[in-house]
Image (tube, rainbow, N blue to C red):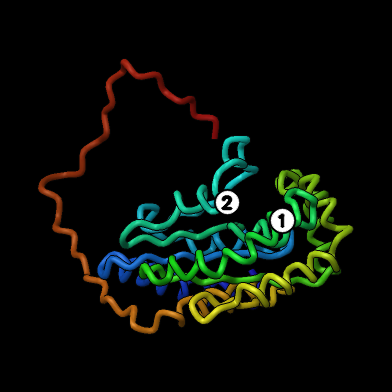
Amino acid sequence: MGKKSKTYDKALEDLQVELVGLTRWLRATGKRMVVIFEGRDAAGKGGTIKAITDKLDTRAARVVALGKPSPGEDTQWYFQRYVAHLPQEGELVLFDRSWYNRAVVEPAMGFCTDEQYDAFMKACPTFEKQLTDDGILLFKYWLSVDQDQQEERFAERAADPLKRWKLSPVDMKAREKYAEIGDLRDAMIERTDTRDAPWFVADFNDQKTGRLDLIRHLLDQVPDKLCPDKEFHLPPLKGKPKKDKVTRKAARVPKAY
């Protein structure tokens, strides 16, 4: 492991300790937090979300990554299926893409009408103000990546059987719409960046640096999150440790390694 990797790992570990403290604070105060991750394909949304949640109690944080809406969902109020995934008391929810699909992906790919797009852009600031007025802490991040870096990541995914699943027909079509997606992104930010729910742009041309910067920024948005962790001392066992003798009725998994 190189010096750069060790430095990154140590910085991430320090941030993850703070993230555990953040979830402890959310539970102690009953606060609810939503973090939205938007960006171009291969920008690094999934890796950042994984880094944030890696050491967290799964009961304290949830990741929401909704697929294509069903025919029934297509007839609902647009925000309805997202509302169902908003956090409960003391919970952190991370959206891997969000209601902002309608601001960038859907119009770029022809998945919504001009009327649906315009209606969303008008309604979104009001919807988000309702969330923040109700006490939800809402943070929105756009992960920025240049096209040459994006192409390198697409090529890496295409060559790696463990990453090929990340490539989709929509990704391939989006490659031809780099400038159009940028224009839609700018329009989205200009019309939905508000005092209640501002946008933050993170440079993800270097994914590891971008990841650390974003997490540091997110933690800094909640400066009063101090909630001391109580030390825990395990009392000694009474007697010798026992073997785990499971009934022979159960089938055994063969030892292959």
Measured as percent of width and height from the top left, residue 153 is found at 79, 60
Look at the picture and state if 42 lies above or below 126. Answer: above
Name the quarter where the C terminus is drawn.
top right
Residue drawn at 33 percent across, 68 percent down: 31
Tell me which corner region of the image, top left, top right, bottom left or bottom right, holds residue 124: bottom right
In what element is the residue under mark 1?
A: helix
Along the viewing direction, whichever of 52 and 1 lies nearer the viewer: 52
Amino acid type assigned to the residue bearing label 2 in the image: Tyr
Q: Going by the image, does 32 lie left or right of 94? A: left
Disc on res. 78: 2
Residue drawn at 32 percent across, 62 percent down: 90
Residue 7 in view of the camera: no
Q: Nearer the viewer, mark 2 or mark 1?
A: 1
Residue closest to the far top: 249
In what element is the residue under mark 2?
A: loop
Along the viewing direction, whichever of 184 and 54 lies nearer the viewer: 184
Along the viewing direction, whichever of 56 and 220 lies nearer the viewer: 220
Task: Compare marks 2 and 1 and give the one earlier in the sequence.
Answer: 2
Mark 2 Cα shell of 10 Å, populated few (<14), some (14-19), many (≥20): some
Q: How many angstroms separate mark 2 from mark 1 (CA)?
A: 13 Å
Residue closest to the far right: 176
Measured as percent of width and height from the top left, residue 50 is found at 54, 59
Tell me which corner region of the image, top left, top right, bottom left or bottom right, holds residue 141: bottom right
Tell me which corner region of the image, top left, top right, bottom left or bottom right, holds residue 74: top right
Amino acid type assigned to the residue bearing label 1 in the image: Glu
Residue drawn at 50 percent across, 67 percent down: 128
Look at the picture and state if 73 lies above or below 100. Answer: above
Residue 247 in view of the camera: yes
Name the quarter where the N terminus is drawn.
bottom right
Disc on res. 115: 1
Measured as percent of width and height from the top left, residue 40 is found at 73, 63
Measured as percent of width and height from the top left, residue 207 is found at 68, 70
